[in-house]
């Protein structure tokens, strides 16, 4: 895995910290700093959201925030043209701080341990970062790293 900013991967049999295993997508949000990356694991669990609304969805009254990709919306660059098969959500509170080395050791065979799906389109990725930087659900310690990536785009 190369684990560059805005990379999208599909990992069959992704193992969570609690030992659970599920097929998951993974989006790299930041560069590696001292072997640490900020990642988000998209989910297709539908919520109480308005249908057909993509992008940043935020409600400060209920302290809710997510970024939604609509089913069939192409989210990666022209080389790969990937889209999610279902409406898919990124939740700010689920951003994780992961070891790049551990991910590369655990998922090291392309096409077997993971599938590279492409790089998220620049405009979409910028909107994801803006959504998370402005969210009260994202840990404060993560926001400067997200802002640094946004400033470098």
Image (cartoon, rainbow, N blue to C red):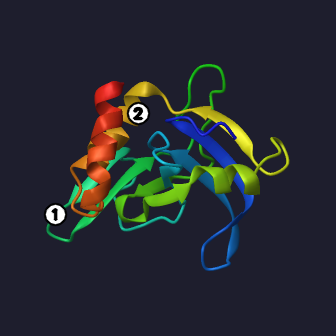
Residue 66 left/right relative to 21: left
Residue 118 left/right relative to 56: right
**Distance from the alpha carbon under mark 1 to that under mark 2:** 22 Å
Q: Indicate the position of residue 101 as horizontal and vertical percent values.
A: 64, 51
Residue 107 visible within the image: yes
Residue under pointer 1? 60
Where disc 2 sits, the SS reads helix
Q: Residue at x 33, y 45 (%)?
A: 145
Where disc 1 sits, the SS reads loop
* Of callouts 1 and 2, the N-terminal one: 1
Q: Which quadrant holds the N terminus?
A: top right
Q: Indicate the position of residue 45 as horizontal and vertical percent values.
A: 52, 66
- Image quadrant assignment for residue 128: top left
Question: Which residue reaches farthest bottom?
Answer: 18
Residue under pointer 2? 124
Q: Indicate the position of residue 55 as horizontal and vertical percent values.
A: 35, 43
- Image quadrant assignment for residue 4: top right
Q: Residue at x 40, y 33 (%)?
A: 124
Rendered position, 26 above or below 62 = above
Q: Residue at x 28, y 29 (%)?
A: 151
Q: Residues within 10 Å of mark 2 (few under 14, many from 20)?
A: some
Residue toward you, 56 or 118: 118
Task: Report the number of numbered marks.
Answer: 2
Q: Which quadrant holds the C terminus?
A: top left
Q: Indicate the position of residue 75 as horizontal and vertical percent values.
A: 52, 34
Residue 42 visible within the image: no
Question: Which residue reaches farthest front?
Answer: 34
Residue toward you, 115 or 60: 115
């Amino acid at each position: 895995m190369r684990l560059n900013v805005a990379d999208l991967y599909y990992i069959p049999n992704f193992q969570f910290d609690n030992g659970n295993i599920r097929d998951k997508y993974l989006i790299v949000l930041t560069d590696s700093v001292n072997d640490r990356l900020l990642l988000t694991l998209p989910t297709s669990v539908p919520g109480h959201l308005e249908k057909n609304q993509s992008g940043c969805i935020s409600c400060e009254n209920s302290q809710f925030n997510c970024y939604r990709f609509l089913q069939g919306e192409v989210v990666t660059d022209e080389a790969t043209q990937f889209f999610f098969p279902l409406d898919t959500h990124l939740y700010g509170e689920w951003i994780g701080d992961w070891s790049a080395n551990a991910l590369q050791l655990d998922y090291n065979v392309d096409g077997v341990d993971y599938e590279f799906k492409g790089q998220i389109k620049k405009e979409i990725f910028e909107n994801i970062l803006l959504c998370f930087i402005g969210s009260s659900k994202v840990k404060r310690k993560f926001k400067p790293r997200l802002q640094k990536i946004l400033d470098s785009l």
